[in-house]
């Protein structure tokens, strides 16, 4: 039976072998975890007084979606509910008794209420230009030009972000993270900023969506989770910037802030561009603010690119000032000549066009040249919205100038007449110029061979240099910027591309263009239809 | 006969065979049982915690206590010399709800006259142990408590 | 020590004579041809059935048989519960393997003519076990309450309605009413966890008792075969099979974990409703012929299969050599496989 014993032994060994295999697989099984297909949802506990609020509101069907939104909020998760924000004391400006109850609640939670827990954010906000009352200080649009009912849902709606409450707090916290979910993802959505930062006078959302930043955002929007925190100085968690990324969110180099003025170095909305002096005591001078913005850009971009880009945009701001100067000088001249009349009251001379009747073309052009074209020109330049810098910007400003001079010429001003009658191509530069050799995007061998000023004035760049130097000496450009500009000036043949030659390549395209010209001449210009038009001259 | 039948070799081989078989069977059965028990007993520990806001720093002074509710559970937030503490309002004796007596600086249970001091420790009466305490965190001017995050468990 | 064993023996009077029957059974001599692994194909379904019972009981700790909560409870088991996916995976893979093992076992018995006189009754019991197992599979899959389970339950029970005479009554019994409602789920749950398993257990006991009573049949009356004893030889085979199956099924649970599908939506009929793979052949054939004719056909086939030993006797008289057996068997298998694969490929 040894044969039997052997086979039995083999059997026993096989049992041992298979049980060890089983052991191994059981270990693997215990280690494996299945992928979750469902996000576990928190069940919000509503207790005490708040249970009464929720029950009564639900029963009466009043603002029940607010309760639903609240339930999804971080507040609800942390047991912060109705009475924590809507708390009121007798005598509060908004205290009232809920109907059919003896609950005294606040109709309007203000930043003072938010500040109980979010003091830092409220303080930062109150210190920012979002809380600034400039729109009441310069208020003639609303005070004079438009009637009050028309501004209730217009001017007042956007500028409600800086509302001054009876309890002396300032601001509309839920303008960006709306009640009652106070959803951060909504706050980060560019269209939220775009609720107000929109339109012909500051098309920020339009500029953003035109820009590469906005385009990339649109392309990847569905994959982005905007619900993140940047309070710990960590890397930016999304691959392309939204508004808050550059203007508010924290990153490796700086903390999150609710003070949007911290990183802005230009007053690019004013009639005259000026370097920001907002709260220099705490925020530092404009160079400090520009440094904050620059280090934010450098999270994604090469420092060289950032510096060149921002310097170019800065020069646009300065250029705008020179154009403005022309508008102002001419309006002054025309006023002195009596062509434009201005309001003078109690010996004070008011230059605001809405105060003087809004009726002379040159003063309308002065206003639009600042408030509309001039702002688009500047904002497009610094926020990468090329169409706004060009066709809605400088192109329209130049049109305005042409109209201004034409207007003046019609009223007999000799200088204007001379300008209008002139055919000199240089007439479109009736103001001082700024410039920079080339741009931040690359070296274009052909683009800079064509501007008239480059070819007509051999001392062009020296004249520009003098202007840029003056700007630097007046603290409008930093030392690094002046050095950067000078480096480009010293190597302008390289940066302008004029050092290199692409003439034969250009000829290739010129030949092709000739074919296009021939085509439209043949198809359009030279086509003669039979017969006469129905209206005969 | 056969070399294979030699007594000492045979018994050694037999022993090793029995060892492998027996050991393998016992080990795999053990792990099988362990896995089965793991399945049967839902995870009660290692649950994440989440925090709830229970009050502001300036809301109560030292020696004061505030009663509040989370869902159906009553709790006390008290500030004593050691700082802020959160206690369950359930008496550890037989589950009645306790009250805070500010003038005597103590918690008092009316059912069987159990008394806890301001640190939740039993001073007098039948309660067998101190009040259930919750972890507290102070963030700027806000007082939070930490509780178990239950959201993964239920159907 | 002696006091304890006397104490024990007084209360549990194990007498050697009474135990002799069991010991005899353990030492029963089996013909040597059974050392072949494919003769273990009868034990395999039994082992798998035991797995099904154990894992099934474990699953009922977390499963909720209500239309609102069924799917979510299955998801909970699969994703949240510690090792839930393993228990559920074992249950699912063991059920698939059990059906395969039963088919293979049937094939083995068929081609070795193990149903010959006097073992015809055991064959009939075996066929009944097959039907019960398929019913268990059907009811079990419906408990997940995803789109496929819900609609397969509706379509499947609709077909039962077509059975002559008793069809509507059976339908009403299965569904707990005329339509598929929450009653249906409760009934399927009951059928799946106790009614059908009890029936199957009784049939298994009958099956094994009959095998033990008759003894293992020799291949074509070859009485001269060598023998080996059930314990420990064949027993070790069984243990190895059990260990191997548990390992293999656990591995399958890890590599191909049990899926969930979409939650059942009574308002939304999915574009393609299919039953489980073992029903593919029947499902496919029924699509080619009118439903009533198909039901009659399969009723006839079921009867033929059940009473095959007697049918075969009649057929043997006409065609006495074995070839006819192989023809019928192979044809059945080929047709079954063909339509199964066809249904897999067609959308």
Image (cartoon, rainbow, N blue to C red):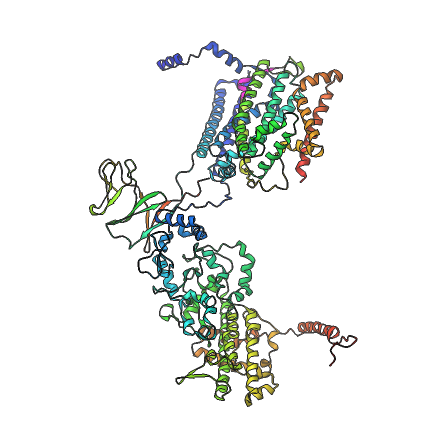
**Quarter residue C202 falls in:** top right
Q: Is residue A377 left or right of residue A533?
A: left
Residue placed furthest toward the top: C17
Residue B144 image point, x, y percent: 34, 50
Can residue A137 be spotted in the picture?
yes
Quarter of the figure that contains the N terminus of chain A: top right
Q: Is residue A242 left or right of residue A524?
A: left
Q: Is residue A491 above or below residue A193?
A: below
Residue placed furthest toward the right: A530
Q: How many marks?
A: 0
| Nearer-the-camera pick, A460 or B103 | B103
Residue placed furthest toward the left: B104
Quarter of the figure that contains the C terminus of chain A: bottom right
Residue C133 image point, x, y percent: 58, 27
Query: What is the span of residues highlighted in magenta in the rendered image?
Result: C226-235
- What secondary structure characterizes most of the magenta part? helix
Can residue C243 be spotted in the picture?
no
Q: Is residue C91 left or right of residue A131?
A: right
| Nearer-the-camera pick, C344 or C182 | C182
Residue C80 image point, x, y percent: 47, 40
Q: Is residue C287 left or right of residue B89?
A: right
Residue C230 inside the magenta-drawn segment:
yes
Q: Is residue A298 above or below residue C202?
A: below
Q: Is residue B9 above or below residue A497?
A: above
Residue B152 inside the magenta-drawn segment:
no
Q: Is residue A15 above or below residue B63?
A: above
**Quarter residue C345 falls in:** top right
| Nearer-the-camera pick, A526 or A340 | A340
Residue A172 image point, x, y percent: 41, 62
């Amino acid at each position: 039976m040894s044969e039997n014993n052997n086979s039995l032994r083999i059997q026993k060994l096989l049992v041992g072998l298979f049980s060890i295999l089983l052991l191994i697989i059981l270990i693997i099984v215990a280690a494996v975890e299945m992928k979750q297909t469902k996000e576990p949802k928190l069940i919000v506990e509503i207790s005490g007084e708040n249970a009464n609020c929720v029950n009564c509101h639900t029963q009466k069907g009043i603002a029940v979606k607010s309760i639903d939104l609240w339930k999804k909020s971080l507040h609800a998760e942390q047991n912060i509910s109705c009475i924590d924000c809507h708390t009121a004391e007798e005598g509060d400006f908004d205290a009232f008794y809920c109907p059919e109850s003896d609950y005294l609640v606040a109709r309007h939670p203000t930043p003072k209420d938010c500040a109980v827990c979010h003091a830092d954010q409220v303080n930062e906000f109150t210190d920012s230009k979002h809380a600034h009352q400039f729109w009441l200080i310069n208020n003639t649009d609303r005070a004079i030009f438009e009637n009050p009912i028309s501004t209730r849902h217009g001017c007042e709606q956007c500028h409600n972000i800086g509302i001054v409450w009876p309890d002396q707090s300032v601001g509309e916290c839920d303008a960006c993270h709306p009640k009652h979910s106070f959803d951060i993802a909504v706050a980060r959505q560019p269209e939220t900023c775009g609720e107000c930062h929109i339109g012909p006078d500051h098309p920020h959302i339009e500029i953003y969506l035109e820009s590469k930043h906005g385009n990339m955002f649109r392309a990847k929007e569905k994959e982005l989770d905007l619900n993140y925190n940047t309070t710990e100085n960590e890397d930016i968690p999304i691959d392309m910037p939204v508004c808050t990324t550059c203007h508010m969110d924290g990153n490796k180099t700086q903390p999150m802030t609710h003070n949007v003025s911290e990183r802005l170095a230009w007053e690019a909305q004013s009639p005259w561009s000026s370097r920001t002096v907002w709260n220099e005591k705490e925020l530092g001078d404009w160079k400090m603010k520009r440094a904050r913005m620059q280090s934010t850009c450098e999270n994604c971009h090469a420092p060289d690119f950032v510096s060149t880009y921002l310097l170019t945009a800065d020069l646009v701001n300065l250029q705008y000032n020179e154009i403005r100067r022309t508008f102002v000088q001419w309006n002054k001249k025309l006023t002195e000549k009596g062509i434009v009349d201005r309001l003078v009251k109690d010996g004070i001379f008011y230059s605001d066009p809405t105060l003087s009747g809004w009726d002379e073309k040159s003063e309308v052009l002065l206003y639009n040249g600042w408030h509309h074209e001039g702002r688009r020109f500047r904002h497009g330049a610094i926020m990468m919205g090329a169409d706004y810098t060009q066709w809605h910007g400088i192109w329209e400003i130049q049109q305005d100038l042409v109209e201004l001079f034409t207007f003046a010429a019609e009223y007999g001003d000799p200088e204007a007449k001379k300008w209008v009658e002139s055919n000199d191509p240089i007439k479109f530069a009736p103001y001082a110029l700024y410039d920079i050799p080339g741009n931040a995007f690359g070296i274009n061998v052909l683009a800079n061979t064509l501007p008239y000023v480059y070819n007509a004035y051999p001392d062009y760049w020296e004249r520009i240099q003098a202007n840029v130097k003056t700007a630097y000496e007046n603290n409008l450009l930093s030392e690094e910027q002046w050095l950067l500009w000078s480096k480009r000036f010293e190597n302008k043949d390289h940066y302008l591309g004029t050092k290199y030659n692409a003439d034969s390549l250009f000829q290739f395209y010129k030949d092709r263009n000739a074919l296009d010209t021939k085509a439209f001449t043949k198809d359009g210009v030279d086509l003669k239809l039979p017969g006469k038009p129905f209206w005969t001259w | 006969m056969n070399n294979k039948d030699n007594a000492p070799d045979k018994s050694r081989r037999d022993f090793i065979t029995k060892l492998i078989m027996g050991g393998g069977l016992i080990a795999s059965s053990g792990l099988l049982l362990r896995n089965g028990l793991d399945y049967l007993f839902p995870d009660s520990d290692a649950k994440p915690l989440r925090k709830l806001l229970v009050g502001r720093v300036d809301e109560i002074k030292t020696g004061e206590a505030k009663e509040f509710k989370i869902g159906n559970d009553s709790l006390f937030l008290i500030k004593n010399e050691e700082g802020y503490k959160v206690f369950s309002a359930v008496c550890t004796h037989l589950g009645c709800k306790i009250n805070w007596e500010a003038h005597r600086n103590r918690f008092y249970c009316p059912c069987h006259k159990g008394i806890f001091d301001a640190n939740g420790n039993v001073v007098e009466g039948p309660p067998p142990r101190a009040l259930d305490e919750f972890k507290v965190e102070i963030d700027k001017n806000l007082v939070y408590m930490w509780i178990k995050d239950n959201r993964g468990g239920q159907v | 020590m002696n006091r304890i064993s006397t104490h024990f023996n007084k209360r549990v009077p194990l007498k050697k004579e009474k135990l002799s029957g069991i010991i005899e059974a353990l030492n029963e001599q089996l013909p040597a041809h059974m050392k072949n692994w494919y003769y273990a194909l009868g034990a395999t379904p039994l082992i798998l059935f035991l797995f099904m019972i154990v894992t099934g009981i474990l699953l009922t700790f977390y499963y909720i048989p209500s239309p609102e909560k069924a799917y979510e409870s299955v998801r909970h088991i699969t994703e949240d519960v510690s090792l839930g996916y393993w228990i559920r995976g074992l249950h699912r893979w063991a059920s698939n393997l059990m059906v395969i093992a039963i088919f293979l076992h049937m094939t083995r018995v068929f081609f070795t003519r193990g149903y010959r006189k006097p073992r015809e009754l055991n064959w009939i019991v075996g066929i009944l076990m097959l039907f019960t197992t398929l019913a268990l599979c059907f009811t079990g899959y419906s408990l997940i309450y995803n789109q496929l389970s819900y609609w397969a339950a509706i379509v499947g029970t609709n077909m039962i309605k077509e059975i002559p005479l008793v069809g509507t009554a059976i339908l009403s019994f299965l569904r707990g009413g005329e339509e598929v409602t929450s009653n249906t789920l409760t009934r399927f749950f009951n059928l799946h966890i106790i009614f059908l398993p009890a029936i199957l257990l009784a049939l298994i006991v009958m099956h094994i008792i009959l095998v033990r009573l008759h003894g293992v049949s020799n291949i074509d009356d070859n009485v001269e075969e060598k023998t080996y004893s059930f314990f420990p030889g064949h027993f070790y085979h069984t243990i190895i099979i059990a260990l191997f199956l548990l390992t293999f099924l656990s591995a399958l649970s890890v590599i191909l974990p049990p899926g969930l599908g979409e939650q059942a939506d009574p308002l939304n009929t999915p574009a393609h409703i299919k039953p489980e793979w073992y029903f593919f052949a029947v499902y496919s054939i029924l699509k080619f012929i009118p439903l009533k004719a198909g039901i009659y056909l399969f009723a006839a086939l079921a009867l033929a299969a059940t009473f095959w030993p007697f049918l075969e006797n009649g057929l043997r008289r006409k065609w006495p050599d074995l070839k006819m057996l192989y023809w019928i068997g192979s044809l059945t298998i080929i047709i079954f496989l063909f339509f199964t694969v066809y249904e897999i490929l067609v959308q």
